[in-house]
Image (spheres, rainbow, N blue to C red):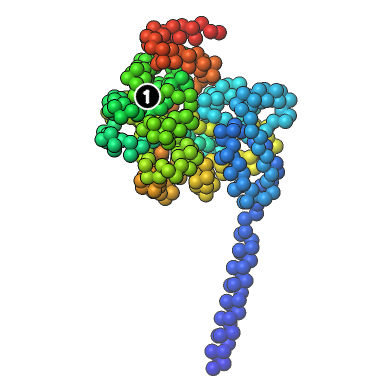
Amino acid sequence: MKFKKAAVILLSLLLIFTAGCKKRNVVENKTVDDLEGKITVWTTKESSSYIKNSINNYKKLHEKVNIEITEMNEEDIESKLGAESEGKVNLPDVICVEDENAQALLKKFSAFFENTSDDIKKDNYLKYKIDNLTYQNNLYGIPLNSKPAVMVYRTDILETAKINPEYIKTWEDFIEAGKILINSGRQIAALPLEDEKTYRIYLNELGGSYFDKEGKVSVNSQKCIRALEILKRMYSSQVLQNVKNNEEAIGLLKQGKTAAAVVSSEEVKNVLEKSPELNGKLRLMKLPAFEEGGNQSVSLDGSNLIIIGSTKNKKTVIDFTKYTAENKENISMLMKETGMFPAYTYNYDEKWFNEKDVFFQEQKPYFLYSNIAKDINDFNYNESFNKIADSIKDTYSAVVIKGQDIKITLDDLQKRIENVK
Protein backbone atom coordinates (compact mmCIF):
# COMPACT_ATOMS: atom_id res chain seq x y z
CA MET A 1 0.00 0.00 0.00
CA LYS A 2 2.79 2.39 1.03
CA PHE A 3 4.61 1.40 -2.13
CA LYS A 4 1.60 2.29 -4.32
CA LYS A 5 1.20 5.63 -2.56
CA ALA A 6 4.86 6.45 -3.06
CA ALA A 7 4.61 5.48 -6.74
CA VAL A 8 1.62 7.79 -7.24
CA ILE A 9 3.48 10.69 -5.58
CA LEU A 10 6.57 10.05 -7.72
CA LEU A 11 4.50 9.90 -10.90
CA SER A 12 2.76 13.16 -10.01
CA LEU A 13 6.06 14.90 -9.41
CA LEU A 14 7.36 13.58 -12.73
CA LEU A 15 4.30 14.92 -14.59
CA ILE A 16 4.62 18.32 -12.94
CA PHE A 17 8.33 18.47 -13.81
CA THR A 18 7.63 17.45 -17.45
CA ALA A 19 4.87 20.04 -17.81
CA GLY A 20 7.21 22.69 -16.43
CA CYS A 21 9.87 21.78 -18.96
CA LYS A 22 7.36 21.93 -21.80
CA LYS A 23 6.14 25.32 -20.66
CA ARG A 24 9.71 26.62 -20.47
CA ASN A 25 10.45 25.26 -23.94
CA VAL A 26 7.41 27.01 -25.39
CA VAL A 27 8.60 30.29 -23.93
CA GLU A 28 12.19 29.73 -24.96
CA ASN A 29 11.23 28.68 -28.52
CA LYS A 30 8.89 31.63 -29.11
CA THR A 31 9.93 33.48 -32.26
CA VAL A 32 11.55 36.80 -31.52
CA ASP A 33 10.66 39.47 -34.09
CA ASP A 34 13.93 41.29 -34.71
CA LEU A 35 12.67 43.11 -37.80
CA GLU A 36 12.17 46.82 -37.33
CA GLY A 37 12.84 50.19 -38.89
CA LYS A 38 11.46 52.28 -41.73
CA ILE A 39 11.02 51.27 -45.38
CA THR A 40 10.19 53.66 -48.21
CA VAL A 41 8.63 52.31 -51.41
CA TRP A 42 8.21 54.13 -54.72
CA THR A 43 5.63 52.49 -56.95
CA THR A 44 3.63 53.10 -60.08
CA LYS A 45 -0.11 53.64 -59.76
CA GLU A 46 -0.69 50.35 -61.63
CA SER A 47 0.99 48.38 -58.84
CA SER A 48 0.10 50.45 -55.78
CA SER A 49 -2.89 48.30 -54.79
CA TYR A 50 -0.66 45.19 -54.44
CA ILE A 51 1.90 47.07 -52.37
CA LYS A 52 -0.66 48.72 -50.08
CA ASN A 53 -2.40 45.43 -49.34
CA SER A 54 0.91 43.67 -48.77
CA ILE A 55 2.06 46.42 -46.39
CA ASN A 56 -1.07 46.00 -44.28
CA ASN A 57 -0.54 42.24 -44.08
CA TYR A 58 3.17 42.55 -43.30
CA LYS A 59 2.67 45.07 -40.49
CA LYS A 60 0.33 42.65 -38.73
CA LEU A 61 3.31 40.32 -38.39
CA HIS A 62 6.00 42.95 -37.81
CA GLU A 63 4.60 45.81 -35.76
CA LYS A 64 7.98 47.51 -35.39
CA VAL A 65 8.35 48.02 -39.15
CA ASN A 66 7.06 51.29 -40.60
CA ILE A 67 6.50 51.26 -44.37
CA GLU A 68 5.72 54.39 -46.40
CA ILE A 69 4.57 54.29 -50.02
CA THR A 70 4.75 56.99 -52.69
CA GLU A 71 2.95 56.72 -56.03
CA MET A 72 4.53 58.20 -59.14
CA ASN A 73 4.74 57.44 -62.85
CA GLU A 74 7.66 55.57 -64.40
CA GLU A 75 9.25 58.73 -65.81
CA ASP A 76 9.31 60.37 -62.37
CA ILE A 77 10.82 57.27 -60.77
CA GLU A 78 13.66 57.33 -63.29
CA SER A 79 14.28 61.08 -63.05
CA LYS A 80 14.18 61.11 -59.23
CA LEU A 81 16.55 58.15 -59.07
CA GLY A 82 18.94 60.04 -61.33
CA ALA A 83 18.76 63.19 -59.22
CA GLU A 84 19.18 61.47 -55.88
CA SER A 85 21.60 58.64 -56.72
CA GLU A 86 24.68 60.85 -56.92
CA GLY A 87 24.55 61.81 -53.27
CA LYS A 88 22.67 58.68 -52.23
CA VAL A 89 20.25 60.81 -50.23
CA ASN A 90 16.47 60.76 -50.22
CA LEU A 91 16.55 57.45 -52.05
CA PRO A 92 13.79 54.90 -51.40
CA ASP A 93 14.51 51.40 -50.17
CA VAL A 94 12.43 49.68 -52.84
CA ILE A 95 11.02 50.68 -56.22
CA CYS A 96 8.25 48.87 -58.07
CA VAL A 97 8.66 49.04 -61.86
CA GLU A 98 6.87 47.61 -64.87
CA ASP A 99 8.40 44.93 -67.09
CA GLU A 100 8.81 47.22 -70.09
CA ASN A 101 10.93 49.70 -68.14
CA ALA A 102 13.08 47.30 -66.12
CA GLN A 103 16.00 46.88 -68.55
CA ALA A 104 16.34 50.63 -69.14
CA LEU A 105 16.59 51.21 -65.39
CA LEU A 106 19.04 48.34 -64.94
CA LYS A 107 21.39 49.70 -67.58
CA LYS A 108 21.29 53.16 -66.06
CA PHE A 109 21.25 52.39 -62.33
CA SER A 110 22.37 48.78 -61.76
CA ALA A 111 25.32 50.04 -59.71
CA PHE A 112 22.82 51.42 -57.19
CA PHE A 113 20.61 48.30 -57.07
CA GLU A 114 20.95 45.27 -54.81
CA ASN A 115 22.09 42.06 -56.51
CA THR A 116 19.42 39.53 -55.47
CA SER A 117 20.87 36.50 -57.25
CA ASP A 118 21.40 34.68 -53.94
CA ASP A 119 18.27 35.93 -52.17
CA ILE A 120 15.65 33.95 -54.07
CA LYS A 121 15.35 30.60 -55.82
CA LYS A 122 15.03 31.59 -59.47
CA ASP A 123 13.44 28.30 -60.52
CA ASN A 124 10.41 29.17 -58.40
CA TYR A 125 9.56 32.14 -60.61
CA LEU A 126 8.35 32.52 -64.19
CA LYS A 127 11.42 32.29 -66.40
CA TYR A 128 10.61 35.26 -68.63
CA LYS A 129 10.27 37.45 -65.52
CA ILE A 130 13.69 36.37 -64.19
CA ASP A 131 15.26 36.97 -67.61
CA ASN A 132 13.84 40.49 -67.74
CA LEU A 133 15.41 41.36 -64.37
CA THR A 134 18.81 39.96 -65.31
CA TYR A 135 21.53 42.36 -66.42
CA GLN A 136 25.13 41.36 -67.12
CA ASN A 137 24.42 37.91 -65.60
CA ASN A 138 23.20 39.37 -62.30
CA LEU A 139 19.64 39.39 -61.00
CA TYR A 140 18.43 42.76 -59.75
CA GLY A 141 15.14 42.62 -57.94
CA ILE A 142 12.30 40.17 -57.36
CA PRO A 143 9.48 39.53 -59.87
CA LEU A 144 6.10 40.43 -58.39
CA ASN A 145 3.33 39.65 -60.84
CA SER A 146 2.48 38.62 -64.37
CA LYS A 147 -0.48 39.60 -66.53
CA PRO A 148 -1.34 36.59 -68.69
CA ALA A 149 -3.81 37.52 -71.42
CA VAL A 150 -7.12 35.69 -71.83
CA MET A 151 -10.01 36.04 -74.23
CA VAL A 152 -13.31 36.71 -72.44
CA TYR A 153 -16.41 36.08 -74.51
CA ARG A 154 -20.21 36.33 -74.28
CA THR A 155 -21.67 32.84 -74.43
CA ASP A 156 -25.17 34.20 -75.06
CA ILE A 157 -24.05 36.11 -78.18
CA LEU A 158 -22.08 33.19 -79.63
CA GLU A 159 -24.89 30.74 -78.93
CA THR A 160 -27.43 32.96 -80.71
CA ALA A 161 -25.12 33.10 -83.74
CA LYS A 162 -24.57 29.32 -83.48
CA ILE A 163 -20.81 29.76 -83.04
CA ASN A 164 -19.03 27.09 -80.99
CA PRO A 165 -16.01 28.71 -79.25
CA GLU A 166 -14.35 25.31 -78.94
CA TYR A 167 -13.72 25.40 -82.66
CA ILE A 168 -11.92 28.75 -82.49
CA LYS A 169 -8.35 27.47 -82.29
CA THR A 170 -6.56 29.96 -84.57
CA TRP A 171 -6.86 33.60 -85.57
CA GLU A 172 -8.13 32.39 -88.94
CA ASP A 173 -10.96 30.61 -87.10
CA PHE A 174 -11.54 33.81 -85.17
CA ILE A 175 -11.94 35.82 -88.39
CA GLU A 176 -14.38 33.28 -89.83
CA ALA A 177 -16.48 33.41 -86.65
CA GLY A 178 -16.38 37.19 -86.87
CA LYS A 179 -17.80 37.10 -90.40
CA ILE A 180 -20.78 35.10 -89.12
CA LEU A 181 -21.41 37.65 -86.37
CA ILE A 182 -21.37 40.60 -88.79
CA ASN A 183 -24.66 39.32 -90.23
CA SER A 184 -26.27 39.82 -86.81
CA GLY A 185 -25.06 43.40 -86.56
CA ARG A 186 -22.24 42.72 -84.12
CA GLN A 187 -18.46 42.45 -84.31
CA ILE A 188 -16.63 39.60 -82.67
CA ALA A 189 -14.22 41.75 -80.64
CA ALA A 190 -12.99 45.23 -79.82
CA LEU A 191 -9.26 46.04 -79.72
CA PRO A 192 -7.23 49.26 -79.31
CA LEU A 193 -5.80 48.97 -82.82
CA GLU A 194 -3.75 52.18 -82.56
CA ASP A 195 -2.05 51.11 -79.32
CA GLU A 196 1.47 49.65 -79.59
CA LYS A 197 0.62 47.18 -76.81
CA THR A 198 -1.95 45.49 -79.05
CA TYR A 199 0.73 44.80 -81.67
CA ARG A 200 2.99 43.52 -78.89
CA ILE A 201 0.38 40.92 -77.90
CA TYR A 202 0.53 39.27 -81.32
CA LEU A 203 4.29 39.57 -81.64
CA ASN A 204 4.80 38.11 -78.16
CA GLU A 205 2.58 35.16 -79.03
CA LEU A 206 4.87 34.43 -81.99
CA GLY A 207 7.95 34.69 -79.77
CA GLY A 208 9.11 37.85 -81.51
CA SER A 209 10.44 41.18 -80.28
CA TYR A 210 11.66 44.54 -81.57
CA PHE A 211 15.25 43.47 -80.90
CA ASP A 212 17.21 40.31 -81.70
CA LYS A 213 19.24 38.32 -79.15
CA GLU A 214 22.24 40.62 -79.65
CA GLY A 215 20.10 43.65 -78.88
CA LYS A 216 20.01 44.98 -82.44
CA VAL A 217 16.81 46.51 -83.78
CA SER A 218 14.71 44.00 -85.72
CA VAL A 219 11.33 45.56 -86.49
CA ASN A 220 11.01 44.10 -90.01
CA SER A 221 11.50 40.43 -89.11
CA GLN A 222 9.20 37.72 -90.45
CA LYS A 223 7.48 37.53 -87.08
CA CYS A 224 6.81 41.29 -87.13
CA ILE A 225 5.39 40.96 -90.63
CA ARG A 226 3.21 38.02 -89.65
CA ALA A 227 1.81 39.79 -86.59
CA LEU A 228 0.82 42.80 -88.67
CA GLU A 229 -0.63 40.65 -91.44
CA ILE A 230 -3.20 39.03 -89.15
CA LEU A 231 -4.16 42.33 -87.51
CA LYS A 232 -4.52 44.03 -90.89
CA ARG A 233 -6.72 41.20 -92.15
CA MET A 234 -8.94 41.30 -89.06
CA TYR A 235 -9.47 45.03 -89.42
CA SER A 236 -9.98 45.03 -93.19
CA SER A 237 -12.53 42.20 -92.92
CA GLN A 238 -14.47 44.41 -90.46
CA VAL A 239 -14.72 41.74 -87.75
CA LEU A 240 -13.01 44.05 -85.23
CA GLN A 241 -14.17 47.25 -83.58
CA ASN A 242 -11.34 49.78 -83.18
CA VAL A 243 -11.39 51.46 -79.75
CA LYS A 244 -9.18 53.91 -77.85
CA ASN A 245 -8.35 51.63 -74.93
CA ASN A 246 -9.28 48.39 -73.21
CA GLU A 247 -11.80 50.12 -70.95
CA GLU A 248 -13.83 51.00 -74.04
CA ALA A 249 -13.45 47.43 -75.34
CA ILE A 250 -14.81 45.98 -72.11
CA GLY A 251 -17.62 48.54 -72.18
CA LEU A 252 -18.74 47.31 -75.61
CA LEU A 253 -18.55 43.73 -74.38
CA LYS A 254 -20.77 44.57 -71.40
CA GLN A 255 -23.28 46.31 -73.69
CA GLY A 256 -23.42 43.27 -75.95
CA LYS A 257 -22.13 45.19 -78.98
CA THR A 258 -19.12 42.91 -79.31
CA ALA A 259 -18.69 39.28 -78.33
CA ALA A 260 -15.14 39.20 -76.95
CA ALA A 261 -12.21 41.16 -75.55
CA VAL A 262 -8.61 40.46 -74.55
CA VAL A 263 -8.19 41.04 -70.81
CA SER A 264 -5.89 40.45 -67.83
CA SER A 265 -6.74 38.67 -64.57
CA GLU A 266 -7.08 42.07 -62.89
CA GLU A 267 -9.63 43.27 -65.43
CA VAL A 268 -11.53 40.03 -64.91
CA LYS A 269 -11.63 40.60 -61.14
CA ASN A 270 -12.04 44.37 -60.90
CA VAL A 271 -14.24 45.10 -63.91
CA LEU A 272 -16.14 42.09 -65.17
CA GLU A 273 -17.00 40.51 -61.82
CA LYS A 274 -18.45 43.85 -60.71
CA SER A 275 -21.04 43.63 -63.48
CA PRO A 276 -23.79 41.39 -62.02
CA GLU A 277 -25.76 41.56 -65.26
CA LEU A 278 -23.02 39.45 -66.89
CA ASN A 279 -23.17 36.65 -64.31
CA GLY A 280 -23.38 33.34 -66.14
CA LYS A 281 -22.96 34.95 -69.57
CA LEU A 282 -19.16 34.93 -69.76
CA ARG A 283 -16.42 32.37 -70.20
CA LEU A 284 -12.66 32.60 -70.54
CA MET A 285 -10.35 30.95 -73.04
CA LYS A 286 -6.75 31.12 -74.19
CA LEU A 287 -6.04 33.43 -77.10
CA PRO A 288 -6.30 31.82 -80.54
CA ALA A 289 -2.95 30.74 -82.00
CA PHE A 290 -1.39 31.62 -85.35
CA GLU A 291 -1.57 27.97 -86.34
CA GLU A 292 -3.38 25.02 -84.80
CA GLY A 293 -1.36 23.70 -81.87
CA GLY A 294 0.72 26.89 -81.75
CA ASN A 295 1.54 29.07 -78.77
CA GLN A 296 -1.42 30.73 -77.03
CA SER A 297 0.41 32.37 -74.13
CA VAL A 298 0.94 36.13 -73.95
CA SER A 299 1.93 38.66 -71.29
CA LEU A 300 0.17 42.00 -70.87
CA ASP A 301 3.08 43.35 -68.80
CA GLY A 302 3.68 42.98 -65.03
CA SER A 303 5.70 44.54 -62.22
CA ASN A 304 8.85 43.89 -60.17
CA LEU A 305 10.41 44.95 -56.88
CA ILE A 306 13.96 46.33 -57.06
CA ILE A 307 15.93 47.01 -53.88
CA ILE A 308 18.22 50.03 -53.57
CA GLY A 309 21.66 48.75 -52.52
CA SER A 310 22.40 51.63 -50.14
CA THR A 311 19.40 50.91 -47.92
CA LYS A 312 20.28 51.03 -44.23
CA ASN A 313 17.70 48.39 -43.40
CA LYS A 314 18.67 45.66 -45.85
CA LYS A 315 17.52 42.64 -43.82
CA THR A 316 14.03 44.02 -43.30
CA VAL A 317 13.77 45.31 -46.87
CA ILE A 318 14.67 41.92 -48.36
CA ASP A 319 12.27 40.19 -45.98
CA PHE A 320 9.41 42.53 -46.98
CA THR A 321 10.01 42.16 -50.73
CA LYS A 322 10.18 38.36 -50.47
CA TYR A 323 7.05 38.36 -48.31
CA THR A 324 5.20 40.44 -50.91
CA ALA A 325 6.25 38.19 -53.78
CA GLU A 326 6.28 34.75 -52.11
CA ASN A 327 4.23 34.49 -48.92
CA LYS A 328 1.37 32.07 -49.51
CA GLU A 329 -1.23 33.80 -47.32
CA ASN A 330 -0.31 37.23 -48.65
CA ILE A 331 -0.47 36.14 -52.30
CA SER A 332 -3.83 34.46 -51.73
CA MET A 333 -5.23 37.68 -50.33
CA LEU A 334 -3.76 39.81 -53.14
CA MET A 335 -5.35 37.53 -55.70
CA LYS A 336 -8.76 37.76 -54.05
CA GLU A 337 -8.61 41.50 -53.40
CA THR A 338 -6.91 42.83 -56.54
CA GLY A 339 -6.95 40.05 -59.12
CA MET A 340 -3.14 40.02 -59.13
CA PHE A 341 -1.52 36.95 -60.65
CA PRO A 342 1.83 36.09 -58.97
CA ALA A 343 5.11 35.53 -60.78
CA TYR A 344 6.04 33.08 -57.99
CA THR A 345 5.21 29.67 -59.47
CA TYR A 346 5.86 27.65 -56.29
CA ASN A 347 2.28 28.27 -55.12
CA TYR A 348 0.57 27.36 -58.39
CA ASP A 349 -0.49 23.96 -57.02
CA GLU A 350 -2.33 25.49 -54.04
CA LYS A 351 -6.02 24.59 -53.80
CA TRP A 352 -7.18 28.17 -54.46
CA PHE A 353 -5.77 27.93 -57.99
CA ASN A 354 -8.41 25.27 -58.62
CA GLU A 355 -11.41 27.09 -57.18
CA LYS A 356 -14.40 27.23 -59.51
CA ASP A 357 -16.02 30.57 -60.28
CA VAL A 358 -19.81 30.55 -60.68
CA PHE A 359 -19.60 33.89 -62.49
CA PHE A 360 -17.72 32.18 -65.32
CA GLN A 361 -19.92 29.08 -65.45
CA GLU A 362 -17.84 27.01 -63.03
CA GLN A 363 -14.52 27.67 -64.80
CA LYS A 364 -11.25 27.79 -62.85
CA PRO A 365 -9.80 31.20 -63.85
CA TYR A 366 -6.55 31.02 -61.90
CA PHE A 367 -5.85 27.50 -63.08
CA LEU A 368 -6.21 28.85 -66.64
CA TYR A 369 -3.92 31.80 -65.91
CA SER A 370 -1.24 29.53 -64.46
CA ASN A 371 -1.26 27.31 -67.56
CA ILE A 372 -0.88 30.37 -69.75
CA ALA A 373 1.83 32.03 -67.65
CA LYS A 374 4.16 29.03 -67.72
CA ASP A 375 4.44 29.24 -71.52
CA ILE A 376 4.84 33.00 -71.99
CA ASN A 377 7.70 33.84 -74.34
CA ASP A 378 10.48 36.23 -73.40
CA PHE A 379 10.06 39.68 -74.90
CA ASN A 380 13.36 41.48 -75.31
CA TYR A 381 12.45 44.91 -73.98
CA ASN A 382 16.03 46.12 -74.13
CA GLU A 383 17.10 49.46 -72.65
CA SER A 384 16.08 51.18 -75.91
CA PHE A 385 12.50 49.89 -75.92
CA ASN A 386 10.84 53.16 -74.86
CA LYS A 387 12.85 55.14 -77.43
CA ILE A 388 11.28 53.31 -80.35
CA ALA A 389 7.79 52.51 -78.99
CA ASP A 390 6.18 55.65 -80.42
CA SER A 391 7.67 55.08 -83.87
CA ILE A 392 6.37 51.51 -83.83
CA LYS A 393 2.93 52.71 -82.77
CA ASP A 394 2.74 55.16 -85.69
CA THR A 395 3.95 52.57 -88.19
CA TYR A 396 1.59 49.92 -86.88
CA SER A 397 -1.35 52.31 -87.18
CA ALA A 398 -0.34 53.27 -90.72
CA VAL A 399 -0.37 49.62 -91.78
CA VAL A 400 -3.46 48.34 -89.95
CA ILE A 401 -5.73 51.40 -90.12
CA LYS A 402 -4.53 53.20 -93.25
CA GLY A 403 -3.69 50.06 -95.21
CA GLN A 404 -0.06 50.80 -96.09
CA ASP A 405 2.10 47.97 -97.47
CA ILE A 406 3.52 45.94 -94.58
CA LYS A 407 6.99 45.07 -95.90
CA ILE A 408 7.74 48.48 -97.40
CA THR A 409 6.56 50.27 -94.25
CA LEU A 410 8.49 48.01 -91.86
CA ASP A 411 11.66 48.18 -93.97
CA ASP A 412 11.42 51.96 -93.84
CA LEU A 413 10.94 51.85 -90.06
CA GLN A 414 13.99 49.59 -89.70
CA LYS A 415 16.18 52.06 -91.61
CA ARG A 416 14.91 55.07 -89.68
CA ILE A 417 15.54 53.46 -86.29
CA GLU A 418 18.99 52.20 -87.31
CA ASN A 419 19.96 55.76 -88.29
CA VAL A 420 18.89 57.23 -84.96
CA LYS A 421 21.89 57.70 -82.68
Q: Is residue 63 left or right of residue 206?
A: right
Residue 208 picture location, percent across and down: 40, 21
Q: How many numbered discs sit on the rendered protein? A: 1
Residue at image location 38% in from the left, 12% down from the top: 403
Residue at image location 35% in from the left, 29% down from the top: 186
Residue at image location 52% in from the left, 25% down from the top: 100
Residue 4 picture location, percent across and down: 54, 89
Residue 298 picture location, percent across and down: 41, 30
The answer to whether residue 255 is seen in the rendering is: yes
Residue at image location 62% in from the left, 23% down from the top: 75
Q: Secondary structure at mark 1?
A: strand
Q: Quadrant of the C terminus?
A: top right
Within-10-Å neighbours for mark 1: few <14, some 14–19, many 20+: many
Residue 60 picture location, percent across and down: 62, 51
Q: Is residue 201 left or right of residue 139?
A: left
- Residue 243 or residue 2, whichever sits in front: 243
**Vertical order, 120 against 99 (above or below):** below
